[in-house]
Amino acid sequence: MTREMLICDNVTKVFTSGFIKKIVVKAVDNVSFTVKEGEIISLIGQSGSGKTTLGKIILRLIPPTSGRVLFYGRDIWKEIKTKEERKEYWRQVHAVFQNPMGSFNTFYKVDRVLNQALELIGVEPNSEEGIRLKEESLKAVGLNPGEILGKYPHQLSGGQVQRVMISRSWILKPKLLIADEAVSMLDVSTRGRIVEIFKDLRNKLGSSIIFISHDIGLSYFISDRVFIMYKGKIVEAGTPQEVIDNPQHEYTKTLVESVPTVYRKWEDFMEV
Ligand SMILES: Nc1ncnc2c1ncn2[C@@H]1O[C@H](COP(=O)(O)OP(=O)(O)OP(=O)(O)O)[C@@H](O)[C@H]1O
Ligand SMILES: [Mg+2]
């Protein structure tokens, strides 16, 4: 039986801002769900529905106002305290964000993001093993190490830079990967290839993935389960077939209708 890796238990996040007039936003509203080992979840919702906030709570970047996040039974906000424990958590739970260029410092060669990943797992970047791992991870995401290493981010395409970010995950071998709009800036065919790389990562490393996106069409191919988020709540959850072919919630219905075609066949999707 597959084990439960992540449990979100009644997670709520309230943001309060403004000095004179207090503005209160319930970004995440009483959300509960579980993610099993090796499972790919798509978290779909419109802008402002709370997806990134939820992702950041799971990543242990912002604390929830109430509720718990358990990773293999451990409350990440109560039981992970020391710097060492946090570092270990971020080795196991790793993020790939939307804007690939934004994740890079333009003054450094792209090698640096891989070197940092190696340092996190205690491998000297210029050692034989370090170099081997860099090459292996770039090849794993379909890149030619000779074309990538030694380059600055602006010398690569957006798709290449995004793949370098994913190759970082290959080095870290995270148990859980949170990909927040990781492919939305890419053209459709590159997007398709990168999604394949994510699937490959799951198949070869057994990682679980939370794939955050606006695109319900894309989620059809990659997810074991789809969660629809609306105004901070998960309003619907199920397999892609259940949710997309037979939406129950009004919001999901409009979401499905607004996609011109939900590509039912991967080949069709790759052809667009
Ligand atoms: N640090 C913050 N302070 C105050 N409000 C915030 C903060 N971060 C997010 N919010 C608010 O919380 C709500 C949810 O934001 P969030 O970024 O989680 O949405 P999202 O679903 O990721 O949207 P998008 O699809 O545009 O990325 C929004 O109303 C947003 O304005
Ligand atoms: Mg977001």
Image (cartoon, rainbow, N blue to C red):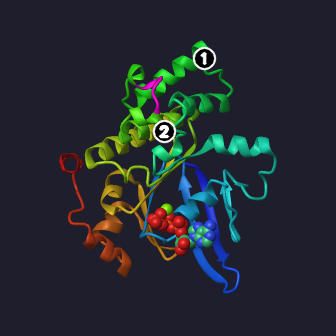
Give the residue at x 63% y 82%.
23
In magenta stretch: residue 149: yes
In whole angstroms, how far apart are the C-alphas of marks 1 and 2?
19 Å
Q: For mark 1, does the 10 Å Cα neighbourhood hold few (<14), some (14 to 19), or many (20 or more) residues?
A: few
Q: Quadrant of residue 117?
A: top right
Residue 126 numbered mark, or none: 1
Give the residue at x 22% y 50%.
269
Q: Can you give x and y, in whole percent of width and height, for residue 29 in the image?
A: 59, 76
In magenta stretch: residue 141: no
Q: Is residue 247 visible?
A: no
Q: Can you give x and y, in whole percent of width and height, for residue 223 in the image?
A: 39, 54
Q: For mark 2, does the 10 Å Cα neighbourhood hold few (<14), some (14 to 19), or many (20 or more) residues?
A: many
Label 1, secondary structure: give it. loop
Residue 165 numbered mark, or none: 2
Look at the picture and state if 192 lies above or below 160: below
Amino acid type at circle 2 is Met
248 left or right, relative to 3: left
- Give the mark nearest the N terminus, 1 or 2: 1
Label 2, secondary structure: give it. helix
Amino acid type at circle 1 is Asn
Nearest the eye: 86 or 18: 18
